[in-house]
Image (cartoon, helix red, strand yellow):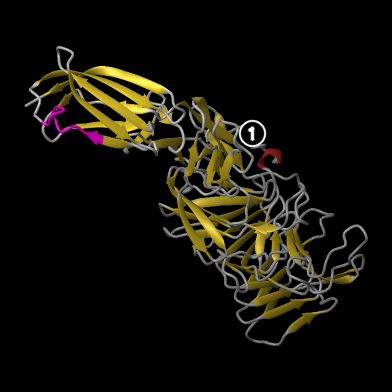
Amino acid sequence: MKNTTFLGNMNRKLIKILACVIGMCGYQAKAQTPLLFNQGSNIFVDNGGILMVQGTVQVGNDGGSPSVPASFTNIGGTVFVEGDWINNSTGTCFTSNNLGKVHFFGGAAVTPTPSTKNPAGFQKIGGTFHTNFNNLILEGAGTAGDAYKEVVNNGIPTLTQLNVSIDNELQLKDREFRLNDNRCIILSTDPSAISRSSIPLNDNSFDGANNSLDGYISTDAYGRLERRTNLLVEYIFPLGHSSKSGTIPSNAAKYRPIGLIPKNTGSTYSVRMANFDATVDIERWDRTVKQDTICEINPDFFHLIDYVGSDLTDIRMYYLSTDSIIEKMANFKNNTIANQWTSLGVGDEAISGAFTTKQVSDYLIDTQYPAFALSNSRPQAAFTATTIGPDGNIKTVTPTDNEIFKTPYTIDVDPTNFPSNIGAEYCFDFGDGTPQVCSSDPDFIQKHSYDERGIYTIVMTVSNGNICADIDSLQLKVNDIFRVFVPTGMSEGNQFFSFMGYINVDLLLFDRWGLLVRQLQVPNPSGEYIQSPWDLTDENGKPVQEDAYAFRMECTRPDGTIDVRVGTITVLR
C-alpha cells in the first residue's frame, strides 16, 4: 500500500520542508536544493493545510524510469513552492474542482549557472505530464519583468502541447507567466478568473521605458492562453511579451491584451500575442499580401485567435496611441479574391485606461485564418476646386467646366478624403512654378491665384506617413478677365450691360436703318466687375420703340488695347 501523507485540520502548524521526510520526499544533491518528491506515494493537503517547500517539487519519478501513478491532492490548503514544479506522474495532480492553492514565491535564483543565468524569482513548471492546478498564484523576489515563471516541456513543440490547466483562478501578481510553446487552459468561465496585482487587465502594464509594472502572459509560436466562456461579456486575455522572451527577435517589451465577447454561451478561445512582424512568424502571415485598400499592416505585433464553431464574436483589440499603425483592424483571410490581409473597417473606438480599443462586432472567426492585426488604409487622393466667377457667383471647377480667371480671382482647393493616421499629409502643386503647399490639417482650404493665362494642372498628392501615396489632378484653363455681358433682350427692370477687366467702354446703339440711337460711355478705372444701365431712351431722352437694335462696343484694356464687340439686342415693351 502506497504511503499517503495528510496535512490539514488536525495539525494546522506550518510544515516547512528543508531536506527529507521519510516516505514522501528526497534530496536532490545535483541541484544542491531541497527536493520534495513522491515517487509511488500520495500527498494530501486538507482544508487549511500549509505545505512550504524551499526547493523543487517533483510529482512522480525523476524521469529516468517508467512513470508511476503518484498523486497530489489539495482539498483547500496552500502549497508554497520556491523552486521548480515537475510532474512526471501518471496519477492525478491535482484533482479538479478543489479549492487548493499552489503559491510560487521563488526568491533567490535556483541554481544559476553561466549558461542559464536564471534571475531571481525564476521558476519552471514542467515534466512529462501536465498539471491541473486548482488555483495558481505567482509572485516572489526580483524586479517585476525580470522575475518570471516559465512553462517548459521536453517534447517537440506542437499546437496541442498542454502543460498547465487551472480550475479556478490564476493570480499573475507582478510576474510574467511565460508559456513558451505550451498551452495554459483556464477552465473557469468566470471573466475575472485571471487577475494582477494592481493594474486592471485592460490597462497597460509597461511604463514608457518598457519596464513591467504588473503581471502578464507571454507565448512563443505554439503557445496559447485558452479561456472557456459562459457569459456574454468581455473575456480579457492579458498577453504581453518581454524583450527577453521568445525565440524570434522581438520588438520592445509590450503588453497588448485582447478582449473577446462571445455571442453565445459555451465558446472556447485560444489566443497568442506575437511581439514581432507577422511575416516572420512560423506560419508566415505575409504583411505584403494585402488588399489594395490597405497601406500597411502593423509590423510590431499581432494576435492569433483560435476558435472552432459558427458563433459570432466581438473582438476588442487594445493599443496605445503611440503605436505606429492603428487605424483599422485586419484579418488574414480568404476574402473571395485571395488569401490576404483584409480590412475589417474602422470599428468602434473607446478609451480603456492608457489604451484605446478598436472593436469589430459580430465577427465569425475562422480557425484556418487566426491572424489579426492593426492596419492603415491606403490613402485615396480627392479634392474639390471652386472659384468665384465674373458674375460674383461661386462655381465648382470640373474637367468639363474648367475655366477660371487671372488675378485677382482665386481658386480654392479642398481635400475630401484625408487619411486619419499619424503623419499623414497632403500637398498641392498648382503647376505654375510656385512652391507646393503641404498640410496635415484635413480642414485646411488652400487658395491660389494665377498671374498669366494658360493651361495648368493642379496635382494633389496625399501620403500615409510617407508609406503609401496617391494623387488626384485637375486641368485648368486660365483666361484673361476681360469680359462683356450683353442680354439678348431688355425690358423695364432688366436694363444692364455688364463689364469686367476693361477700364473704359464706349457703347453705340443703332436702329435697323443704321441711325445712331444712343451713345453710352462707361469709365471703370479699377477694371472690376460693374453693371451699366440703359434706360431704353434715345439721345433726346425719348423712349425707344420695341424693336431690334444693333450695338458696337469699344472696350479699352489697361494697356490701351481696344477690343471691339458687335451684336444685336431686342427691346421689349
| Residue at 51% across, 39% down | 343
**How would you rate the neighbour count of disc 1 (Cα within 10 Å): few for under 14, some for 14-19, many for 20 or more?**
few
- Residue 402 on the magenta segment: no
**Figure check: 225 above or below 96:** above
* 372 left or right of 253 in image: left
Q: Where is residue 419 shown, x and y percent of the image?
A: 52, 43
* Amino acid type indicated by mark 1: Thr
Quadrant position of the N terminus in the picture: bottom right
The residues colored magenta run 532-541
| Residue at 74% across, 71% down | 3
Quadrant position of the C terminus in the picture: top left
* Secondary structure predominantly adopted by residues drawn in magenta: loop
Q: Quadrant of residue 429?
A: top right
- What is the secondary structure assignment of the residue under circle 1? loop
Q: Where is residue 399 shown, x and y percent of the image?
A: 42, 25
Give the residue number, with chain letter if any, for mark 1. Answer: 288
In the image, 307 versus 355, the foreground residue is 355
